[in-house]
Image (tube, rainbow, N blue to C red):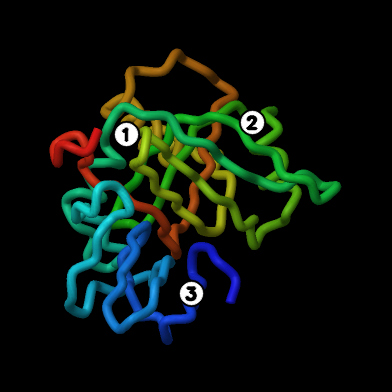
Amino acid sequence: MSRGWGTFSRTAAGPPARNPVAGTRCTAGGGAVTGHLVGARPAGGACRSGRRGRTIPSMVHDLSNPDDVFLAFWRERLLSTLTTVRPDGTPHVVPVGVTYDPEAGLARVITNRASRKARNVQAAGPDGMRVALCQVDWARWSTLEGVAVVREDPEAVAEAVRRYAERYRQPRVNPDRVVIEITVDKVLGRASVLRAAGLA
């Protein structure tokens, strides 16, 4: 089998143990496995990182019940990348400030209406475009995936600005500001507190 997120790799020692914790390797059951299952929790057994054999706490990918580590990571003053698709089908990846609202299941990115990212999403039509937001801080990382639309109504923009100011700083006045709203339906990543665990 191919290696990677959402896939399982089999060793000669036997079938892989199903380990739903992202970014860990579990040898229970005689096989090594990497991967993740969105919305699942570990089903028992000790899973350890590859670094000095120490256990690393991992993010739980349950959108209906996000854990404190996940939420805290998305409140830190960190930038993310937003990946959209140009009309010619090539990826467009840019750094952005993003806020995540777990109650509404929305991630928000404020931008200028003439920006390439906004135009990419609008070009996809009223049903929106599937996009990805990725936030990285050394070994900690998380990706939010979902369908994006561009909102121009003043209420939506004002709410996005308010949340941006809480996480980062008050943005400058921009009459051409819009908000890219992403309805998050999939989460990948690991937001382990590595420094607190003495692993950094």
Q: Residue 97, position in %: x, y?
A: 44, 30
Residue 8 numbered mark, or none? 3
Distance of mark 1 from mark 3, alpha carbons? 38 Å
Q: Classify mark 1: helix, strand or loop.
A: helix
Specify few, some or many for label 1: CA neighbours under 10 Å numbering under 14, 14-19, or 20 or more: some
Mark toward the start of the polypeptide (1 vs 2) = 2
| Type of amino acid under label 3 | Phe
The N terminus, quarter of image: bottom right
Mark toward the start of the polypeptide (2 vs 3) = 3
Q: Classify mark 3: helix, strand or loop.
A: loop
| Type of amino acid under label 1 | Arg
Q: Residue 133, position in %: x, y?
A: 50, 45
Distance of mark 1 from mark 2, alpha carbons? 19 Å
Eye-nearest disc, 1 or 3 = 3
- Labels 2 & 3 near each other (Cβ < 8 A): no
Eye-nearest disc, 2 or 3 = 3
Distance of mark 2 from mark 3, alpha carbons? 41 Å
| Type of amino acid under label 2 | Arg
- Up the image or down, 5 lies above or below 154; here it is below
Mark toward the start of the polypeptide (1 vs 3) = 3
Which residue bears the numbered disc 1?
A: 163
Which residue bears the numbered disc 2?
A: 113
Specify few, some or many for label 2: CA neighbours under 10 Å numbering under 14, 14-19, or 20 or more: some
Q: Residue 178, position in %: x, y?
A: 55, 34
Could you tell me which residue is drawn at 33 percent across and 57 percent down? 104
